[in-house]
Amino acid sequence: MTRELQSPYLFDCWYVAAWANELRPGEHMRRVLLDRSVLLMRGLKGDTAAIGNVCPHRFASLSEGRFERDLVECPYHGLRFDMSGQCVHNPHGDGRITERARVASYPLVERHGALWIWLGDIMAADPARIPDLCLLETTDPTDRAPGYLLTKANYQLLSDNILDLSHADFIHPATLGTGGEIAGTKARARLEGDIVTVEWAFTGKGMAMERSLRDGAEVDSRFEVTWYPAGVMILRNDVGPVGEGEPAAKRAGVHIMTPETSRTTHYFFENADAGRRKKLALALDVFEREDGVVLEEVQRNMGDSDFWDMEPLILSSDSGAILARRVLQRLIRRERARSATASHPPQKARLSQPF
């Protein structure tokens, strides 16, 4: 496997840049996405936009400037840019604005309570390619309880963590662990197009935190993770009486990994069931104290080494994670080849798209 085929990111893909509730009207925020400094804005009427955060004059961060009347002012020399990235005010000299006085503008779509950004070829930015996360939507928006963590580990390591749930028996023995039941079950992975699904089904006592509710009675448990490139996952868990087929409880949640850099990840997550706020608190506690600690240590051990160059040992529980890595590698390779052979490079993100 040659290093030249390795690339940390797939650009022609929708990524979650932020939860929608992170931006109120008249607010802006900086977020690094795929190594790019991006300015996210919500106008006074609620419309959103994403533009390059670095002023083209002397490269100051626009996010450090004022955002008023849907215009952001560079804090260094006072150039003002609208939400399409175009400079509309030059306070110097005769006030002339050159054609180059603009920053990149990226397609941004608000859907399922999240802000989705496209950092690749804008001609390919089809909102229909956004994964369907309607399971998160509720008639009362105040019922939503989205979570966010910035984790010091590569985004594919975080995806591996969700695609291989056998780790729960060892990292989360008192909460999400099944006492070895899920680890002892063969994971079944399948591929449909570019979408990976991995499933575990077994009979036993189930998760540790639920056993007291059933007085230790055995149940049929099924876990399923569906992965969409490059890091959107839906985790479903069905539990029911042994042999009855129809589960008594169906639960689901969403886990989304957006790269900040090759070694840091924006982790967005939300439970889709009742009692979301209580489950958010549990998820934050469990991940910060358990998963996050391990994953950040894994990243420190890896340093800047490529995953495959380290010749990882592959276990049967890795089937879903390895399949997702292979799919992502194939998509990245195809994207790079397309860019290299095109008669002209993909159109850079410039103009705001009316999605």
Image (cartoon, rainbow, N blue to C red):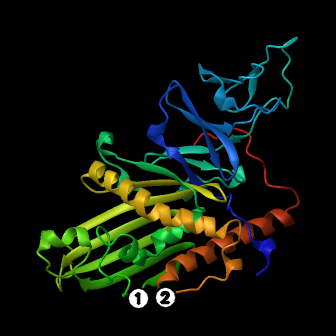
Q: Residue at x 68, y 55 (%)?
A: 124
Q: Residue at x 58, y 61 (%)?
A: 153
Residue bearing mark 1 = 186
95 relative to 146, above or below: above
97 relative to 337, above or below: above
Along the line of sight, the residue nearer the viewer: 207 or 174: 174
Residue 355 appears in the picture as rendered: yes
Q: Residue at x 48, y 61 (%)?
A: 292
Three-letter code for the amino acid on which mark 1 is drawn: Lys
Instruction: Tell me the number on the disc at residue 316.
Output: 2
The crowding category of the residue bearing disc 2, from other C-alpha atoms within 10 Å (few below 14, some 14 to 19, many at least 20), is few
Q: How many marks?
A: 2
Along the line of sight, the residue nearer the viewer: 345 or 240: 240
- Name the secondary structure under disc 2: helix
Three-letter code for the amino acid on which mark 2 is drawn: Ser
> On the picture, is 318 further left or further right than 347?
left
Residue 263 position within the rendered picture, expressed as x and y whole percent measured from the top left: 64, 59
Instruction: Tell me the number on the disc at residue 334.
Output: none
Residue 30 position within the rendered picture, expressed as x and y whole percent measured from the top left: 61, 38
> On the picture, is 205 further left or further right than 298?
left
- Name the secondary structure under disc 1: loop
Among the two numbered marks 1 and 2 on one chain, the one whose residue lies closer to the N terminus: 1
Residue 313 position within the rendered picture, expressed as x and y whole percent measured from the top left: 59, 85
| Separation (CA) of disc 1 from disc 2 | 7 Å
* Quadrant in which the C terminus appears: top right
28 relative to 260, above or below: above
The crowding category of the residue bearing disc 1, from other C-alpha atoms within 10 Å (few below 14, some 14 to 19, many at least 20), is some
Give yes or no for contact between labels 1 and 2 (Cβ–Cβ under 8 Å): yes
